[in-house]
Amino acid sequence: MRQYDVIVIGGGLAGLLAAAAARKSADKVLVLQKGVGAIAVGGGSIDVLGYGTDGRLLPGPQAGLAMLTAPEHPYSKIGACLVAEGLYFFSELTAKAGYPYGGSLSTRGWLVTALGTLKPSAFFPRSMDASALGTAPEIAVLGFNEMKDFYPELVVQGLKQRLGTNKKYRIIRIPSGLAAGRDVNSLDIARNLDHPANRQALALQLKRTLPAGTAIVLPPVLGTKPDYEALIQLEQETGCVFIEAAGLPPAVTGLRLQSLLINHLRDEGVEIMEQADVTGALVEDGVCRAVYTDNFDRRRTYGARAFVLATGGFYGGGLLAGIETVTEPIFHLPVRTAPRDEWGSESLLPEDGQPFAKTGIAVDASLRPVNAAGDIQLNNLYIAGRNLAGYDNCMEKSGNGVAVASGYYAGKLAGEVRA
Ligand SMILES: Cc1cc2nc3c(=O)[nH]c(=O)nc-3n(C[C@H](O)[C@H](O)[C@H](O)COP(=O)(O)OP(=O)(O)OC[C@H]3O[C@@H](n4cnc5c(N)ncnc54)[C@H](O)[C@@H]3O)c2cc1C
């Protein structure tokens, strides 16, 4: 059996942050991940808390955290100071990696979606910052001919509704420059724009039609790497402001963040094992001694002093829904759900969230799993991310914020466990 200080199960945003935080005080950290997380489809913005539990737009993330009253919410368990510490840790990490995120806890930022709506967020790549839409006299929405998932007309329609018709709006469509006869997606175009010469050609095309100072909304295509080289070059060569839209899988902005975090972990000597499906655990006297993976050839066992469970919710595979029950498949932890006939609210978007979305593992103030009576189930296991009970990330706009804050806190606690 291979022995580690900390083992993180799950390689989504919560798991990667947990590993980074654990590594600060633990030497041997291992990430076991079955697949990639929601970050690859969900985008790289860190939405902390856009809307309150009554559905009202909050003045800003920090003010929203102070107004949060739900005791079961992960942020209430973690506490506002540690949430802020986790988000600061994240921001520092992006800055050190040369891809500093914009935004802050005190002010609400806005992102444009591929539907032309505006979404509140807290921390985001600078290329997604939509604040220039308020000041630019002219807005252009750029589409690529062979790309089917981004409709500039829809974006313009949405923006007119929200920003008014006083501004000048334009739609620009250009060939993607990729092989004709096939559909292309944002990742194809981003790969193409990894090359400075292709960016220069795009800048020349845009300069011919758009005056300097135009805010250009486009799909997330400004390169695949976690840097701002494409953004800087295009802005310098056109004099325009570029704004990448959110919510368009494959989420190039999320993939950039994923590479940044993986590069950081590898530099720090964290081991990352991919296609490692954790299927069970060895537990003695309320302590987890090891977990095991089952592959086609054989079972492998990995021991550690502390573990972080960051396997996601229904999407990631951390929670499994049956007809009547929801289960957690590795440790068989108790899962907190609403009574079966109350899983779904009749209203599609109820202000206080959908009950099924709040399904998850209940925890104590140290993120250790508890049962309905509040008894800790395993002393050296910490829960992080989408498998936590008590929040509806879609309604609140809090998904990646909870992943960062709980991942950081769970990793920090796990790293501090001594034999
Ligand atoms: C389509 C979509 C769009 C979204 N958009 C946004 C957004 O714009 N802003 C925002 O803030 N949030 C957004 N979210 C929510 C946000 O992405 C998630 O809440 C957050 O990323 C969850 O991270 P996680 O690490 O907890 O879980 P996941 O990202 O689900 O990661 C779980 C990880 O655990 C692994 N795993 C599962 N079971 C096992 C096992 N048995 N063994 C080993 N590994 C296992 C998975 O392979 C994966 O690596 C979006 C989510 C989706 C699905």
Image (cartoon, grey):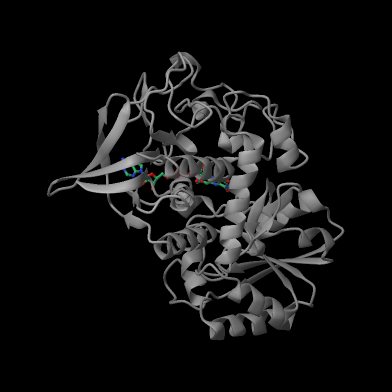
Q: Is residue 241 visible?
A: yes
In this orientation, which residue lies closer to the viewer: 373 or 164? Answer: 373
Q: Measuring 62% from the left and 33% from the top, which residue is drawn there?
A: 79
Q: Residue furthest front?
A: 419
In the visual, does 413 lie left or right of 280?
right
Q: Quadrant of the C terminus?
A: top left
Indicate whether 90 appears above or below 323. Answer: below
Q: Is residue 257 left or right of residue 210?
A: left
Q: Residue at x 71, y 51 (%)?
A: 104
Is residue 47 at all visible to an observer of this figure? no
x and y percentages locating residue 254 in the rendered image: 51, 57
Residue 238 position within the rendered picture, expressed as x and y whole percent measured from the top left: 72, 80
Residue placed farthest to the right in the image? 166
> Which quadrant holds residue 98?
bottom right
Q: Nearer the viewer, residue 93 or 173?
A: 93
Residue drawn at 61 percent across, 35 percent down: 395
- Total marks in image: 0
Q: Is residue 115 above or below residue 268?
A: above
Residue 218 point in image, percent of width and height? 63, 65
Residue 269 locus on image (x, y percent) = 38, 61
Question: Does residue 120 appear to the left or right of 299 in the view shown?
Answer: right
* Residue 146 versus residue 68 in the image, above or below: below
Closer to the camera, 244 or 346? 244
Q: Is residue 158 above or below residue 418?
A: below
